Structure formats: structure tokens, C-alpha cells
Image (cartoon, grey):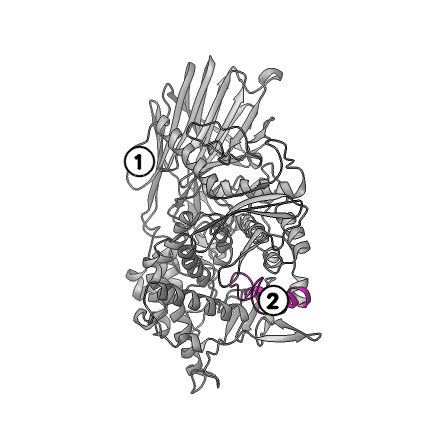
Amino acid sequence: MAATKARATGIKSKDYIPADYTWTSQSRNSSESMPCGGHDIGMNVWVENGDILIYIARSGMFDENNTLLKAGRIRLSLSPNPFNGKGANFSQTLRLNDGAVYIKGGNTEVRIWADVYTSVVFAEINSKTKVDAKLSYESWRYKDRPVTKAECQQCSYKWNLPKDCCTYQDSIQAKGNILSFWHKNRELTVFDFTVDKEKLNSIKSDLYNPIGGLRFGGELTAPGFNFSGTTDGVYASTDFHAWNFVADGIRKSTITFNLYTGDKAPDVPTAKTSKKRSAAWWHAYWQRSYIVPAGIGANTDNPNEGWQKMLRNYELFRYMLGCNAYGEWPSKFNGGLFTFDPVYVDPKMPFTPDFRKWGGGTMTAQNQRLVYWPMLKSGDTDMMVSQFDTYLRLLPTAVARTKHYWGHGGASFTEQIENFGLPNPAEYGKHKEGDDYGTERNAWLEYQWDTALEFCSMILQAHSYSGMDITKYEPLIVQCLQFFDEHYQYLAKQRGVKALDGDGKLILYPSSGCETYKMAYNPSSVIAALRTVTEQFEAYMAAKGTQDISAYALDSTFKNRIPDIPLRTINGDTCIVPAIVWARIQNVETPQLYPVFPWRIYGMGREGLDIARNTYLKDPHALKMRTHIGWKQDNIWAACLGLTDDAARLNLEKFADGPYRFPAFWDPGYDWAPDCNRGGSAMIGLQEMLLQESPEGKLLLFQAWPSEWNVRFKLHATGKRTVEAEIIDGKINIIKQ
């Protein structure tokens, strides 16, 4: 983690240079791969039995079933093999400052990177001696592959799998030194199945459909190579067909793999141009923010020390997020672009490399949000646009389905939402005549409408942190709030005469405290969400000079109809209650602490800190459900409440090395590997230990940081502020604020 010697021209002597991450032995299989990527590409890179192997994935490659397909696997073999043998001096290095992977052995180096501005992969071979080379494009989609019930979670059908469901074969052609592959979706997809099941055929033409007829592919170019034919093989548990290219006696070659959506591949930048501009982008990326040990000389840090390992893994995971900086679609919580053969995650899952649990095109908001919240403090708000724009694309569908089902305004975004804006058809459940077709008949998901509000808040905070122009998102924020106002008055009038309770407040019933407290009446998490987003939006509009938000189709008296957060007493201490009443507990979330994070009504420098601490320390459900696994947020709440011992322990557990070779490839937790919502929640918790703000914007430093951990950080705060500070032997030094 310590600053290392500058390697690239144009780097200032005081710039932060992240340390390289290096292996000096080869890997056993794809689970021991190293991430690499950029723009919207993620790669798994590893060396196995002397061969360089690369899985390549690109954001948005959704097939008819909404499985997120990989682009394929590349294998490079050199002879004589420079990576084998005692004198090979083998190494594989992720150079974070360049964003590239370097593989060295003998007199040969292979540099692998993705261009940051286009969807192109480069593999640059340099050898001081002549080598023979064999390059193979390996595809398991050389034929139609039936999707079995056991692997149905890779797609959006899940347990509603049609009998004839299959992953259709790609079109693959090779000639000379070029290979082309493409996949063209049928017009009839899981979108049509979902529309029919959810009784939306009458408005089908108004609904967003990103997968029907979608065409995507890639073009591989290998100078100095020639196509030599095809072979068959098996890797892990999956058979494949290989298209092989050979080159005799080469010293240099730069292989490109150009990925695209549409009818043809765009122009490819030269390797020289891409290398220079991509390395410059990554270097600038690391200048945005960092968290590093302080008071330690260069290269003398000890990443095996628990808390320093935590900082290293923070940095490695932030690299993984940067690999999909500018994708059309957001980084998925369940593996991102870095999934590997599922048999190495669970031996009972001998499926293709396209498999992941919880789907490819299913955007589970409760999980997705954790991937994006840390980008505010890390200064990466430009990378949040893909998540924001996804909701903006889905907005017309959310408005149309609301009007269709209930006849009122607003946008209803459900949990387990598809990339076309409708509830996942399996999670949607079974309905009978007379049921409300707008609700999910699902014990976990029913009446959970509030998850979109977190992205509304992120949008507003992205403006506050960086000055991002969020004008185009204003309708999204308004429509999400409007839904709650109109829908719960609509439901109240269906039950009785009055639309509001005796105090003129909305009756939020039936509602849900996350997926846990079901059939809830006035859940605290929903109330906190409505209150915070409304206040943030009003402040934003006031700063623009617009006082009357009714001009935006949101009643200016709406805030007055939001209920108060419900409280209760536990052994004489006031605590936040999950809801006034609920029918059952379905999951293991702790929504009674959502008023702490993400909604920041309670916390350090805020009123009612004792109430929130009581809830964290004494609520029996909060105590029972506490853990560091997966998407759990206990580490964040402990930090936000200034509970240093718990924050340190839970964040150390969150950031502990994963079970695979790359430390930030965490186990599936509740979802899939590598678990990106674990990484995101860990990042948030670490940031909160170091930097918080009062409601007035006063900076609160090291509120939950152990004084004996010497650390320096550069993070971002509201008002477009950059904060640099350090703590050494318990003494705080503010460098910049």
C-alpha cells in the first residue's frame, strides 16, 4: 500500500502510487484468477500449466433468457514455454497504477489490459528470443445448451423455466488472423414471458425492452498468427470448441479483442495510444482518493497485519469497481464481471462459466445499492452514472405499470427488478383472479417499494459531492416519492373512507421493513427514506432557486404527510422499532437501523444518538442478526454510531481475505462469488470509520477509528470538498479540508 517508485512519465513525485499485487507461482484453476479490466470489461487472468488463460466479460451481454454471457475464454501457449521450469522466475503482477496485468517468465513478458475509453482488450507479447505461439478462442456456446432446472438461477426464468429453454449457440467464424463471434437474440425473450405473466400485454408497446433482438459480439485480431483449425476440449466441468491460431518464431505481437453491441465492431485504438491513455486514467483514478498506512516508509508496510490487509483489500476491490467505470449497465452485486467456473464455488454446480446465482439481468436493488454508495466518498461519482441511468431508462415502465394496475400516478419500482423494469417473473409469484396483479405474491418481496429511494438519494448526494448535473433525474425522484403519496392514499380509501390517519399522516400499510418485517404498518426504514429523500430534494430545488416543488408534480404538503419514525422502550431505553406492528419476520436484515444508514437521521453529530445506539446495542433482533457476512451492514452502523471496537472488529471481518487466491474475491455469502455487495458494504464501513459529517456539513474525523492504527486518507465530502488527514500515534493532523 505504501507509495512505490513512479514508473510512468507525467507522474508527479508526490502522487500516490498504489503498490503492485504479485504472485510468483502459477494457478491451479480459474478460481485462482486475477481481475483486470477497464471501461466496461472485466477479465479473469491466470496461468495454468504454463498457459495464459483469460475469461472476458462485458457489461450488457444479456441473452434471450437474461443470462449475462461471457465473451469467451482466451488461451495463449508459448513454446518453448518461458513460464515453466526452475529458471523461469515466473511472476504475475496486477499493476494497479497502470490497470494492467503483467505475466513474466524467462525472457518473455505478456502485458494484458483493457482500454478505458472503448471496449477493447489488448494482450501484448514481448520476447527477447523467438517463440512459437498458439492462440485459442474457446467457446462453450458452440452449440445450443439446454438450461436445466439446477442452473435456472443464471437467467430470469428461475424456477419458471420453460421446457425448451436453452442458451443458444453463438455464430463464430475464423479466417486468416481474425476471429469474429456474435450472438443475436431472438425477438421473443423472457421479457415477453414476463409481460404476459404480469398481465401487461395491453401496454406492452409502452414498456422498455432492451433484450429483444439484441446483437452483441467481438472481433479478435492476432497479427503474425494464422488460423489452423478447430479442436475440442473440456475445462473444469464444461466442454468447449477451440478455434486455434498459430505463429512461428515470433518475438512480438499485440492481440486485440474488440467487443461491441450492434451490427459491427467499432474502430480499435492503437496499442500505443490505448496503453498510454489507459495508464494515465488509472493513475488519475488513484489520485481521487486513498486510504493508506501513515508514518511508514515506502515499501515497509505489512499487509499481513490485519488492519493493513483491510486497507489493501479496500484498494483491490476499488480496482474491480473501476473496471466497469463506464458500462451501460451497472456492476452486478453477484460477481460483477469476474465470475469464474461455478464448480469451484460449489462442487454441486458443474455448470458453464456463464452461470451465477441471482441472475444476470436481475437488478436486486437491496444488493446493488451497496456497490454504489461508497463511490461518493471515494470521489467516483462519474462511475455511478450507469446505475442512475438504468433507473432512468426503467422510469417509463415503472410509471406505466403503476397507472395500469392502480390508475394513479408515480413510479413503482419493485425489489428483484429486471433490466427491463418489471418484477422478476419467478419472484413475482402466483396470482389468482381477484388478486392485485401489481404486487409481488412473494413472502420476502411483497409490498417492498422503497429500494429505489436509495438511488434517488445517491443521485442527490452525487450532486452535493461533485456538482454533477442531475437535472435529467429530477422526474425519477419526483415519481418515486409521488408513488408513495398516491398509492397509500389509494389503499386507505379501498379499506375505508379516510385517506389519512387521525394526524393527517399516510398509513403505510401493508408495507415492509426490507425483506424482514412483513405486512408491516409504518416501517421505520420506509418512513426514514421518504423523509430524507424529500428533504434532500427540497434542499436541492431551493439551491436552484425553486421553492415550490408542486411544479414538479409533487404536492408541496407531501412532507407533512410522512409519519414519524416509530420508537419503543427496551428495558427503559428508547429504541427505534422496525414498525408499529408486523405480521412475521422473513429474513435477517435490520431495517430499524436504516435511519442511521443509509438515511442518516441518527448518527454522530446528530440528535438522538443515544436512541440509535440503544437500538444497535439492545434490540434483540439486531443482536441476533449481527454478522459480517455478505450484504450485512452492522459494520457500517457501528462506524456511524462511533462504536469503535465493533466497527474495527466487523470491518476486519468484512475485509478478511476471501477463500480464493485473489484477496478481494469473496465467498458467495448470500449471493454469488466474488461477492461484490460484501466488498461495497466493507468499503462504506471503512470510510465511515474515518470521515462523517454533521447535518450542517461539519467534518467529523476518525469517529470510529482505533487511535493505535496509524492511517492517512484522502476522501470526498459534500460541497465538492476533498479531505486529507492522518492520525499517527493518536494525534490527528488535518492536511486539507
Residue 184 lies within the magenta run: no
Q: How many marks?
A: 2
Return the residue at label 2. Answer: 609
Tell me if 389 is positioned left or right of 657 in this view: left
- Quadrant, the N terminus: top right
Secondary element at image label 1: loop
- In this view, the mark in front (2 or 1): 2
Amino acid type, residue under disc 2 in the picture = Leu
Along the viewing direction, whichever of 569 and 417 lies nearer the viewer: 569
CA distance for labels 2 and 1: 56 Å
**Mark 2 crowdedness (10 Å alpha carbons): few <14, some 14-19, many ≥20:** some
Residue 619 lies in what quarter of the image? bottom right
Give the residue drawn at x 60%, y 31%: 299
Secondary element at image label 2: helix
Residue 555 lies in what quarter of the image? bottom left
| Rendered location of residue 547, percent (x, y) | 34, 70
Residue 613 lies within the magenta run: yes
Return the residue at label 1. Answer: 265
Is 722 placed above or below 273 here? below
Residue 283 lies in what quarter of the image? top left
| Rendered location of residue 644, percent (x, y) | 66, 55
Give the residue drawn at x 38%, y 28%: 256
Along the viewing direction, whichever of 95 and 512 lies nearer the viewer: 95
Residue 576 circle label: none
Q: What stretch is highlighted in magenta?
A: 590-618
Along the viewing direction, whichever of 248 and 102 lies nearer the viewer: 102
**Mark 1 crowdedness (10 Å alpha carbons): few <14, some 14-19, many ≥20:** some
Is 363 placed above or below 100 here? below
Q: Earlier in the sequence, mark 2 or mark 1?
A: 1
| Rendered location of residue 357, percent (x, y) | 52, 50
Amino acid type, residue under disc 1 in the picture = Ala
